[in-house]
Amino acid sequence: MSITVGQLWHHPVKSMRGHPVDEVVLGPGGVIGDRAYGFVDVQTGRLVSAKHPKRYGRMLDCVARFTEPPRVDRPTPPVAVTFPDGETLTGDEQAIATRVGELLGREVRMVTSVPPGVPYEEVWPELEGFGPDDFYGALQITPGEQDEAGERVLAIPTGMAAQGTLLDLAALHVLAESTLRALAAAYPEGQWDGRRFRPNILFADDGPAPGAEYVEDGWIGCDLRIGSQARVHVVAPTPRCPMPTLAQGDLPRDPGILRAVARVNRRELGGMGQFACAGAYAEVVTPGVVRAGDEVRVTQTVAESSALASAMEMISEGLRAARSRTPAGGS
């Protein structure tokens, strides 16, 4: 099977739209500059994330670009943010925060890091077989609460497997074009554009691996050698939240996107249960420059300990314990 790097993205600001680039630099913690900036809601003290769409979904109306390519040996460059009315603010973090606050109707401050334990908010479905309070405890997250729209939201610690970053969980998110084609066949009414899923790397490939319906299934536990330098280890499928269903630039809101993924591509994540998945989470083994068009080689490898694998095992153990405490027939 032929695999190359199809598209690469920089997402400088958490939950804002990013932009395609010809190359990225992979460091130990993922793409250098990925979600380098974010915003904290002054009222709640939580990291702003469009995974709580009714409160923060308008973040996706903004586009963020670095003023110069980020590099390993340099400070993170400033960003230029273009707002829905077309105005672009460059470098002035206070002015950008003020405009974002006006857009959201909430006071926010721009940050490049948050203290350990600061959460982001997410609308998350309850799992079957045990009570939601057990689920919250297993994930070590704040119990669900109702927001002003009556939705139940969770507060999940930021960077569970990527400590010190503004990432949700893993350091790297990859996706294959053949997965988008397979999902499009299941739901042809949808616009299956890679931008919806906000990957770091979109791979161009000619089909799934033998015995796997989706190509990422065959990559779990393998290394991907990308170009002449970089090597990443694929750890787990990527569970999808409602974010790919939201309007993003010229992509319309479409709840059918997530319903289609849930219908045709549910995957077991350790002991956590089944989730609607598309793409895969990975970690960087060997840093290096990745360029569009680079050849990708899939190699079997001996399983190694990793922050992501450890975080997922911790969650799985917590869920198994929660299930064992749940009385038969109860919740």
Image (spheres, rainbow, N blue to C red):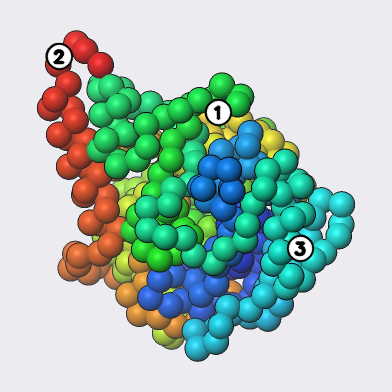
Residue sitting at x 61%, y 30%:
255
Viewer-proximal residue, 205 or 199? 199
Q: Are marks 1 and 2 in contact (CB under 8 Å)?
A: no
Q: Which residue position is annotated with label 1?
A: 147
- The residue furthest front is 43
Disc number at residue 328?
A: 2
Mark 1 surroundings within 10 Å by alpha-carbon count, few (fewer than 14), some (14 through 19), many (20 or more): few
Question: Which mark is first along the chain, 3 or 1?
Answer: 3
In 3D space, how far apart are the residues under numbered discs 2 and 3 (Cα atoms)?
A: 55 Å
Disc number at residue 95?
A: 3
Mark 2 surroundings within 10 Å by alpha-carbon count, few (fewer than 14), some (14 through 19), many (20 or more): few
In the image: residue 56, left or right of residue 224: right
Q: Secondary structure at mark 1?
A: loop
Residue sitting at x 60%, y 26%:
148
In the image: residue 7, left or right of residue 301: right
Residue sitting at x 32%, y 75%:
285
Question: Which mark is first along the chain, 2 or 1?
Answer: 1
Q: Secondary structure at mark 2?
A: loop
In 3D space, how far apart are the residues under numbered discs 1 and 2 (Cα atoms)?
A: 32 Å
- The residue furthest top is 329
- The residue furthest bottom is 73
Residue sitting at x 68%, y 43%:
106
Q: Amino acid at mark 1?
A: Asp
Q: Which percent across, then down, holds residue 66?
A: 67, 73
Q: Amino acid at mark 3?
A: Ala
Residue 169 visible at all = no
Total tally of numbered discs in the picture = 3
